[in-house]
Every structure is written in structure tokens, then in C-alpha cells.
Amino acid sequence: MNLERLRKRVRQYLDQQQYQSALFWADKVASLSHEEPQDIYWLAQCLYLTAQYHRAAHALRSRKLDKLYEACRYLAARCHFAAKEHQQALDILDMEEPINKRLFEKCLKDESGLKDPSSDWEMSQSSIKSSICLLRGKIYDALDNRTLATYSYKEALKLDVYCFEAFDLLTSHHMLTAQEEKELLESLPLSKLCTEEQELLRFLFENKLKKYNKPSESVIPESVDGLQENLDVVVSLAERHYYNCDFKMCYKLTSVVMEKDPFHANCLPVHIGTLVELNKANELFYLSHKLVDLYPSNPVSWFAVGCYYLMVGHKNEHARRYLSKATTLEKTYGPAWIAYGHSFAVESEHDQAMAAYFTAAQLMKGCHLPMLYIGLEYGLTNNSKLAERFFGQALSIAPEDPFVMHEVGVVAFQNGEWKTAEKWFLDALEKIKAIGNEVTVDKWEPLLNNLGHVCRKLKKYAEALDYHRQALVLIPQNASTYSAIGYIHSLMGNFENAVDYFHTVSLVFVPNFKWRTFTTF
């Protein structure tokens, strides 16, 4: 009986995704070989691929193969992890190897003529150890131990620099600060483990890591210029545009990716975020329904639905329901926690909003957005000291973000530091103008009005009027802007103009408008 031919048949059926056929023949090969370890291992693989996790783990553990071979230990732990038995999986991975393991293996090979299992099963020891670290990180993630999860992913990457899954989990979940990202990249033994592909790996890692860098700083080396049209590279560039607040360019790039690959996993969160920023509700509605139909078990699908209901307004309860479903499917999904916080923030439920933002901050310590929104909530509850502290943390992560600069300026304004506030507002305006030729998005209207208020405080009345008029271009029907202009005219002694603007407010925009002084603004 030629068992090698049958073993190849098992691998062939696995390659063809005919798992039941592979399982049938793997079972027969294991019996015919009198349960050689490699055949039991492949039998367990087939059981795992047919979702028979407990049978697979039992096949290995009942024969104590998990105590003899790293590959078997890894597979047994993976079976328990797939069955959501996280502590059991961790216990298997953390199980100490017997002192006499090597001696036992040597005797076993001498008696049975078996080869080294690592070569027989086509896996190197470093690859298996990297896989074990990766799995350990996922288990710690599931057990809400973010610190040990991060450490495990780093170790997995150091053992196998090609282990993209570990790298992706670190970056896409924002588990590292910018400094930690830099230290990780420097610590990877690229020159030692991949001399030929060193430049390729370094480019791919740097391209994905430095999301807060300017998009113009992304340069593709000549040796890998074929990657210019690669969708992952385009998504990384789009992400840089997103974090630099150039949402139009980001949308342009993500739309190209979505046209070529309609459900590109890395592109979807960025694309959804851009649709929200650009207020493209119809497009988000269509995309979210397609995602729910095709991928109901993917958290990004329900995240998209929740974002849509947040956009349309007065549907916050609906939004919370779907965002909660996203966090149930993957409790470490940071974007859903941020959006969940927004659903409370728009209703001025500050405590619940901050609870969601704090959860996001714990999950995404490399992202500035949770810190920004926590600071906003503290500012709205008149706790300027804590607001300033969190804005400072956001600024340390994203020093070029105009939203953060604006909020730092607001805190300075509330503290009566007019010059400091003006500096931050002008810096924010400069960053926005650097994105495009002019400020055209209505979300920047508060910045222009705040510049008007601070210029009024500094008695720069002409400049204040100019900023308020620019704000009117973005949102023409804003009563408070007309009131601010009228108030400045009264300070300048232009009483007729002041009366005209005040009449416009009281008669046209807000017939029941209650007058407020601007001394506190």
C-alpha cells in the first residue's frame, strides 16, 4: 500500500476545498499508518476545516501529540479558540514542554524511522512559534487584555517578518502610538530574515504605519514601482488623505478601489468614514444594505448601517442598535465604539458618550479621534482643564489635525487667552487651506465664526467682520452669525448697519429670537 500517494490525495482535496473527501482519506491513512503523528495531525487539520473543533482537539490531545509537537499544540489551541473556549486555548499554549521532550522525540525517531516533523509537515520552527504568538495575541484580545495582545503580535512579527496578519492587527486596530510604531519597525530583523525582499517589506510596512504623514511624503522605490496600482497601497494613501482631512481626495481614491474590488476589507472603513464626512447618505445607504446582505457576520456591515442612521438624524436609537451589533460581533472594533459615542453625544448624553469614547481610546491608543471626542465632551460639561488635557493627547498623536487645533483654540478662548486662541485658530485655518485652495466645507463654519469672535475680543473689528462674512458663505441661514456681525457694527459705531443685521435676525430667521450679549463669546 502506497501511503504517500494517499497522503498527497489528502493534500489535493484540501487544496480543492473538498474537505469531506480529505477527511475521509485522512482518517483511512491514519489507520493504515498505525496512527503516525503526521497523519493524525492532518486528520485533525481536516476536522478543523470541517468545523469539528472538539473532535480535532481530541484527536491530538488524546494521543498527547500536543505535548510532543509544536504544530500539534498550536492546532489544538486553535480548535479551542475557534470554539470560543479562550481560557482552554491559552492553557494549551502556555503549557510547559516536558524536560525529556527532545530525548523522547529522538527515541521515537530512532525506533520508528520518522523524520523531523518540522520538515515532514512543511513548517519551520520559527513559523510555528510565530503562529503560536499570533494565536496567543488573538486570545488575549478576546479576553480584553490589550497589553499582552499587543506584545504577542509584536513577537509574532519578529519571529516571522512576513506574518502580515500580526502586523495588520497592530496597525488597523491602532494598537501602537507613532513612537511605538517607529520602534517596532526598527526592531524587525529585516536584513537578517529577508535579504532579497528587505526593501519591499520596509516600503509596505512604512506605507501602512505612517498614516498621519503627508500623502506627498509617500514615495515608491524603483525596485517595487509595480505596486503603484496595488489596491492595498492605494488604500494606505487614501487613509493618509483621510487623517489629513482631505476627504475629497480620500473619496476619489477609495471610490477607485471600490470599483475594482467592491468589498475590499481594508478600504471599507475608510470609505464609510469618508461618505459620512462628505454627507453622501444615499451612497452609504446602498453600500450598507449590500454589506448586510452579503456579510451579515462582519462588524463593518452593521457599522455602515449605524453610520447611515446617524447621518439622517433623529434615528439615534436605530443607530445604537446596529452599532451595538457591530461591537457584539467584534468587541475590539474601535470605529463602531466611536460612532456609538456619537449617537449619545448628539443627544447631549455626555456620560454615556464618554463611556463609549473611553472604550474606543483603550482599544485605539494610536488614534487621536477618541481623545478628541472625550475632550469635546469635557468641554461641553464646562470642565476645561480635562478638555485641555485630552486635546493635548490628541495633538501629540495628530499634530497636524485642524479639528484638534480648533478645539485647543476653543479651550484657550474659554480661558480668556485671546492671543493663544487666535494662534490656534489661524493655524487650523492654514492647515485647511493647504488641503484645498479655499475653505468650502460647511463643517469649518464654527472655525471662521470663532476667529471672528476672537478678533472682536482683540478689537480687530474689520478682520472679525471678514471672518463672519466668510462663515455666512458656508452657512447663509445662521442667525448667530448675523447677530455677531450686528454686534461688531455696534462696537464700531455703525449703528444703522447693526440695526439692519439685528432686524434680519429677529424678523427673518428667528421671529422669537431672545437677545444674548456676546461678552461671553
Image (cartoon, grey):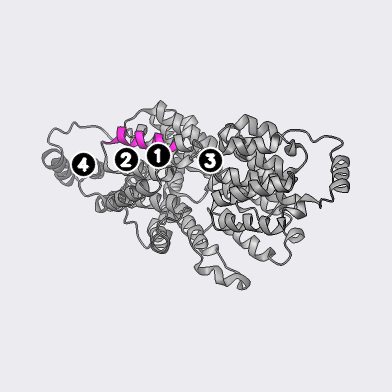
Query: Which residue is tagged 1?
Result: 339
- Circle count: 4
Magenta segment, which residues? 315-327
Q: Which mark is residue 364?
A: 3
Residue 88: x and y in percent read: 64, 30
Q: Which mark is residue 189?
A: none
User: Residue at the location (72% across, 34% down)?
Assistant: 94
Residue 180: x and y in percent read: 64, 46
Distance from Cα at disc 1 to Cα at disc 2? 8 Å
Quarter of the rendering containing residue 503 = top left
Q: Residue furthest top?
A: 351
Task: Tell me the amino acid under the disc marked 2.
Answer: Leu
Q: Earlier in the sequence, mark 2 or mark 4?
A: 2
Q: Residue furthest bottom?
A: 222
Query: Which residue is tagged 2?
Result: 310
- Determine whether label 2 and label 4 are within 8 Å by CB: no
